Image: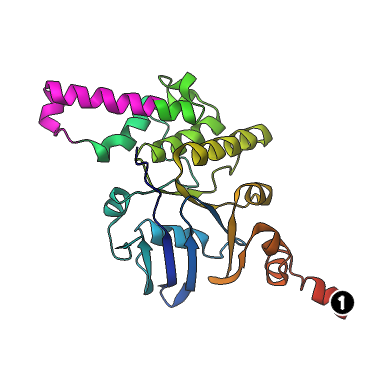
Amino acid sequence: MNTTPPPELAVRDVTVRFAGLTALDGVSLTVAPGSVHALIGPNGAGKSTCFNVLSGLYRPAAGSVRLGERDLTRLAPHRIAALGVARTFQNILTTEGTVADNLMLGRHALTRAGFAASALRLPHAVREQRTHRARAREIAELTGLAAHFDSPVSLLSYGDRKRVELARALCLEPRVLLLDEPVAGMNGAERARTVEVIQDVRTELGLSTLLVEHDMGLVMRLADEVTVLDFGRRIAHGSPDDVRRDPEVLRAYLGTGGPGEEDAA
């Protein structure tokens, strides 16, 4: 585990276009080291597009993404992951294998033994495998999955399967974690448990987190800073309290002009 503080993640003037449609229009945000930064906005605001740029799935038409001194803007996803950026997805990616199998997939990029050494079970490969499995078990404990470590993922509850996705991302030993709607589809108890896990991860690992989420209660509870997108543009930025009172945010979410509109009436 990397014990040095994570570097700053800086997004500067990022623009993404698809066949003439501007999905992101000069978006900038900064995830401070060790902070939780929420990226919110109505459906179609550009949040998932932004995540896809940060993880290397999309390349912007303009702008830059930097992790500390490293420019991520044109790097392939596996190279960005190797530099310490891991993400989860809105949808559960797999229900195959056990929890342990899925977490070990997250350790794959950190494996030094080659395929032949692993297949032949050479001593150094066996030792490395044991080390990775022990670390995967620690992460299962941190994310509340220890009791299910050897259980098939297909037998777990929906909330537990979503936490497997989180744990697998953590197995990469990231310095920045991108969480794409981590509580989507969960019931109240599952949401509360996942919030606890995210808080524990922040405390124990000290990594930076960029969070996309529609649950405003969760955002207000977890986030240090919030950036709001609407139609691909940044319309607000600040503390959770400042953002939820911003007239532009009220207009985007509620179709109202906020306090100013009421005064005019």
Q: In the current view of this chain or complex, which residue is farthest to the right?
A: 265
How crowded pointer 1 is (Cα within 10 Å; few <14, some 14-19, many 20+) is rated as: few
Vertical position of residue 234 compared to residue 4: above or below: below
**Where residue 235 sits in the image (x, y, percent)?**
61, 72
Q: How many marks?
A: 1
Residue 136: in magenta span: yes
Q: Secondary structure at mark 1?
A: helix
Q: Which residues are magenta?
A: 112-137
Viewer-side residue, 99 vs 263: 263
Picture layout, residue 28 above or below residue 85: below
Residue behind mark 1: 263
Asked if one can make out residue 121 in the rendered structure from this viewpoint, the answer is no
- Give the position of the N terminus as an image quadrant: top left
Residue, far front: 4
Left or right relative to 217: residue 106: left
Q: Nearer the viewer, residue 41 or 238?
A: 238
At label 1, the amino acid type is Asp
Q: Residue at x 62, y 52 (%)?
A: 214
Q: Position of residue 84 (x, y in %)?
A: 34, 49
Q: Is residue 218 visible?
A: yes
Q: Residue at x 55, y 35 (%)?
A: 197
Give the position of the C terminus as an image quadrant: bottom right
In the image, taking residue 146 as reference, residue 255 lies left or right, namely right
- 228 up-or-down from 195: above or below: below
Q: Quadrant of residue 165?
A: top left
Q: Please, what is the dominant secondary structure of the magenta stretch?
A: helix
Q: Which residue: 37% across, 55% down? A: 55
Residue 151, given in percent of the width and then of the height, sits at 43, 20
Locate residue 194 relative to residue 262 in the image: left or right. left
| Residue drawn where x is 39% and y is 55% of the image | 7
> Is residue 213 on the magenta stretch?
no
